[in-house]
Image (cartoon, rainbow, N blue to C red):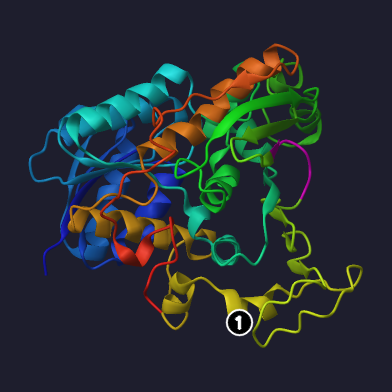
Amino acid sequence: MNKVKIGVVGLGQRGTDLIENSILKMQDVEIVAVCDEYEDRYKNAAELVNKAKGYVPKGTANYRELVEMSEIEAVIVSTSWETHVEIAVAAMEAGKYVGIEAGGAYSIEDCWELVRTSEKTGMPCMLLENCCYTRREMMCLNMAKKGIFGEIVHCEGGYHHDLRYEISFGEENRHYRLRNYRLRNCENYPTHEIGPIAKILDINRGNRMLSLVSVASKSVALNDYASFKDGVNPKLKDTRFAQGDVVTTTIRCAGGETITLTLDTTLPRTYSRGFNIHGTKAYFEEATDSVFMDIANDFEGDVDWGKFDWAHAKENADAYAEKFDHPIWKRFANEKIEGGHCGGDWLVLRAFFESVAQRADVPIDVYDAAAWMCITTLSEDSVAMGGHPVAIPDFTRGKWIKPKKQTLVETYRLDKIPDIE
């Protein structure tokens, strides 16, 4: 069996988790080299590979040494947010496929550099946005492509995640979020929300995002947390954090749709992606795990569409999943899907590795990466100007109107419903 030979750069919590819980369980992928600026991290990753596979990959603190290795075909970048673009560009210039972990951009020029480098080298760059492959988001994608929502008017998403512990212990854990929350005020983690929504709205494939407005609340939650949480550096009680506790971003699209994104990571709360789809015929709501259908929606099939009971038709998404689960999920329903994010990690990595193996285009490409990542730096500008509208660049330079055909691995494509049932 031919194996895809890869290097992994960035071996903190995320990179180590991908290796241990997903990549090492894939029989057709070989980790040739591991890299982190901290020696203990790359040595730990090498030992994980040795225990699971019986060989020791090369370990290095220099990512340029890794990307120049001739035997490596693809590079996974799971470093701190601010280094993603630099490493991805170096890897593409070295002739490698690149998979970048989620995170926002620091400048529009960063996004253009990703696009230009991919175009110049011909090497695909895939954003490893796992929420594009999670079950409910994929069910809604399937429903949207089949017209079940009618005409989609508005979508909502959020990164609602209590990260106070992770941020506050950033120095002890050598984690990048702390320095970002000290110095930036923006929608710093947009891709979990915008990824699935962009695929549903055909962004960069017949539609595009035109402009955004972002506003931020005051920043007090991390100071409050430091005042009562044992072990937190007492200096954080008086640290001025730039990052607002809640950031709300509204996006307008060429097709007339609007999108609302919410970042909420420093207040006590349960985890949620706040994923909602509003159409003229139906509505999906993550909070109640429900699909609400209009009584006038006369789609054929064995689902009882006639129950027009908005107040009580809750927690019914499993019933709709029997009919509308995405073919990717149907295919893998009887198989053990490894990895985090309810299997999203596994599926997005499989999409990437199988694209590399077949030398195919990737389903979340460099234009997606640029469009989704740029929300961070543009929201930073909008917040700084009191919620002033900011234009979103067209990284396709007009090609979104009539997208070029791509050679995609059928099993994992997101632009249409794959023929794998």
Q: Is residue 373 above or below residue 272?
A: above
Where is residue 63 shown, x and y percent of the image? 24, 31
Q: How many marks?
A: 1
Q: Is residue 274 above or below residue 379?
A: below
In the picture as drawn, the residue positioned furthest to the bottom comes out as 302
Q: Is residue 392 above or below residue 327?
A: above
Out of 80 and 93, give the one closest to the viewer: 93
Q: Which residue lies under the disc numbered 1?
A: 322
Q: Quadrant of the N terminus?
A: bottom left
Left or right for 21, reference 232? left
Whether residue 60 is visible here, answered yes or no, is yes
Q: Residue at x 74, y 64 (%)?
A: 282
- Let me know if residue 395 is in the magenta part: no
In the picture as drawn, the residue positioned furthest to the top comes out as 385
Out of 41 and 382, give the one closest to the viewer: 382
In the picture as drawn, the residue positioned furthest to the left comes out as 70
Where is residue 249 shown, x and y percent of the image? 69, 31
Q: Residue at x 67, y 55 (%)?
A: 151
Q: Residue at x 58, y 74 (%)?
A: 324
Left or right for 320, reference 310? left
Q: Is residue 232 above or below residue 159?
A: above
Left or right for 392, reference 6? right
Q: Which residues are magenta?
A: 260-269
- Let me know if residue 266 is in the magenta part: yes
Q: Quadrant of the C terminus?
A: bottom left
Quarter of the figure with residue 83: top left
Out of 74 and 326, give the one closest to the viewer: 326
Helix, strand or loop for disc 1: helix
Amino acid at pointer 1: Glu
Around disc 1, counting alpha carbons within 10 Å, would you say few (fewer than 14), some (14 to 19), or many (20 or more)? few
